[in-house]
């Protein structure tokens, strides 16, 4: 610029100065610094402001205003307070967990010194370690808390947040129950405490129609429950032989079923329908309770006054399914002054065959019908 003014024609130089709003006389660069914004500016110098200087002035003003608005007294800022209390009356608080823990360590060392005991070393134990926030599982949960993504100076270990996530400031959804611990557990399927019995991994006994099969090891076990002995003696040996004769497996009729594990002769005592004997007036109350809990109800009526409730205190007999063409029948007998429900074989039952009997439900109207899935040739289509 200096060489241009020295070598150029004076007439052209005057024309260039007038067109580019340059000063007519030589001046120092310090003369072009704008005055303080609070001071009035001469009208003849407003047009001579450089855009760069105006931008610099605007940025300085923005910084000044931001500093004035963001400067909040330290005692008025939101902060965490860590308090530690004990049953013996000790209480301390600090702005950081490490400072609070140091006060605890100091008191412990002082008490041990007064008692002339050996000083303990807390070099590897810090406040964050005692609080548990250094544990990996706790850190994993803390990094998911609402607002954790706004901690820009924290280096996340398990959860990475993108700049897009930091820009969003969404409030967490409001839990209608107040917290997760107060939520009602909702199951996808109906609760069934015996679902493991219907597992496909439990293989059924192989169906065998061999009429000549007469295993020596089962002759003695079938003899006590045969028809040649008195009913009381047959019932006495029933509990020992029923587990060897039958088992619960997955049923093609419904859920689980009772299957034969060895050949059973016609008229042989198979199993007792065991359970808790209750009054008949309590059946409706218990049934409603079981339905409210999503538990299947298993009951068998002895007479007009007593009912066997096998829902919670029953045996494998509760899983015997209904069939319109059954191979077993039920009978109530009295042994030693007590009534028992026993299941007998109606015909010869072969190994691997499912045990069934007729539920004999009372006939009801069309709206209350229960479909039958026995699949027999004489199926009535409905249980009731």
Image: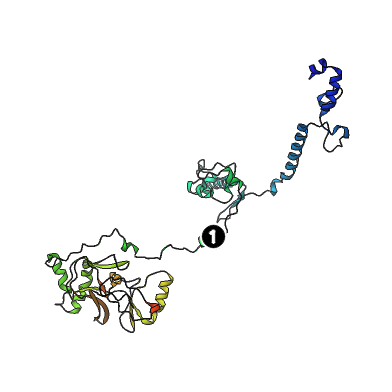
Q: Is 175 situated above or below 162? A: below
> Can residue 27 be seen from the camera position used here?
no
> Can residue 129 be seen from the camera position used here?
yes
Q: Locate residue 252, reporting x and y percent.
A: 29, 66
Q: Locate residue 246, reporting x and y percent.
A: 23, 67
Quarter holding the N terminus is top right
Quarter holding the C terminus is bottom left
Question: In what element is the residue under mark 1?
Answer: loop
Q: Is residue 275 left or right of residue 85?
A: left
Q: Is residue 81 left or right of residue 184?
A: right
Q: Locate residue 192, reporting x and y percent.
A: 37, 65
Q: Is residue 35 left or right of residue 300?
A: right
Q: Locate residue 129, reporting x and y percent.
A: 51, 45
What residue do we see at 83% from left, 23% from top?
Answer: 16
Q: How is the image coloured?
A: rainbow
User: As rendered, which of 69 and 189 lies closer to the eye?
Assistant: 189
Total numbered labels: 1
What residue do we see at 86% from left, 18% from top?
Answer: 10
Residue at the extreme bottom: 304
Res 318 quadrant in image: bottom left
Q: Which residue is mark 1?
A: 179
User: As rendered, which of 53 and 311 lies closer to the eye?
Assistant: 53
Res 301 quadrant in image: bottom left
Q: Is 370 situated above or below 304? A: above
User: As rendered, which of 14 and 34 lies closer to the eye?
Assistant: 14
Other-residue count near label 1 (Cα within 10 Å), few / some / many at <14 / 14–19 / ≥20: few
Residue at the extreme top: 7
């Amino acid at each position: 610029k200096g060489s241009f003014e020295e070598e150029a024609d004076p007439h052209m130089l005057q024309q260039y100065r007038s067109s580019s709003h340059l000063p007519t006389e030589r001046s120092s660069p310090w003369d072009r610094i704008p005055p303080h914004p609070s001071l009035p500016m001469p009208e003849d110098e407003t047009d001579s402001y450089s855009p760069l200087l105006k931008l610099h002035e605007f940025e300085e003003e923005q910084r000044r205003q931001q500093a004035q608005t963001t400067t909040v007294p330290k005692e008025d800022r939101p902060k965490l307070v860590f308090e530690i209390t004990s049953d013996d009356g000790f209480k301390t608080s600090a702005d950081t967990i490490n400072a609070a823990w140091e006060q605890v360590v100091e008191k412990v060392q002082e008490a041990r010194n007064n008692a002339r005991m050996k000083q303990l070393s807390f070099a590897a134990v810090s406040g964050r370690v005692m609080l548990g926030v250094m544990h990996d599982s706790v850190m994993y949960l803390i990094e998911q808390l609402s607002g954790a993504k706004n901690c820009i100076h924290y280096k996340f270990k398990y959860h990475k947040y993108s700049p897009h996530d930091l820009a969003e400031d969404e409030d967490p959804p409001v839990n209608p129950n107040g917290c997760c611990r107060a939520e009602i557990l909702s199951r996808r399927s109906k609760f069934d405490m015996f679902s493991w019995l219907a597992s496909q991994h439990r293989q059924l006994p192989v169906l065998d129609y061999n009429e000549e099969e007469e295993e020596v090891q089962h002759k003695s076990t079938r003899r006590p429950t045969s028809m040649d002995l008195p009913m009381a003696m047959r019932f006495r040996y029933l509990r020992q032989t029923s587990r060897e004769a039958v088992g619960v497996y997955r049923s093609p009729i419904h859920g689980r079923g009772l299957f034969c594990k060895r050949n059973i002769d016609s008229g042989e005592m198979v199993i007792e329908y065991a359970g808790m004997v209750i009054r008949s007036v309590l059946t409706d109350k218990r049934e409603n309770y079981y339905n409210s809990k999503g538990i299947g109800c298993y009951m068998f009526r002895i007479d007009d006054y007593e009912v066997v409730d096998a829902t919670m205190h029953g045996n494998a007999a509760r899983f015997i399914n209904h069939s319109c063409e059954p191979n077993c029948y039920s009978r109530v007998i009295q042994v030693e002054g007590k009534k028992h429900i026993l299941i007998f074989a109606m015909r010869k039952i072969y190994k691997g065959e499912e045990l069934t009997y007729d539920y004999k439900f009372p006939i009801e109207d069309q709206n209350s019908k229960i479909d039958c899935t026995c699949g027999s040739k004489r199926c009535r289509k409905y249980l009731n």
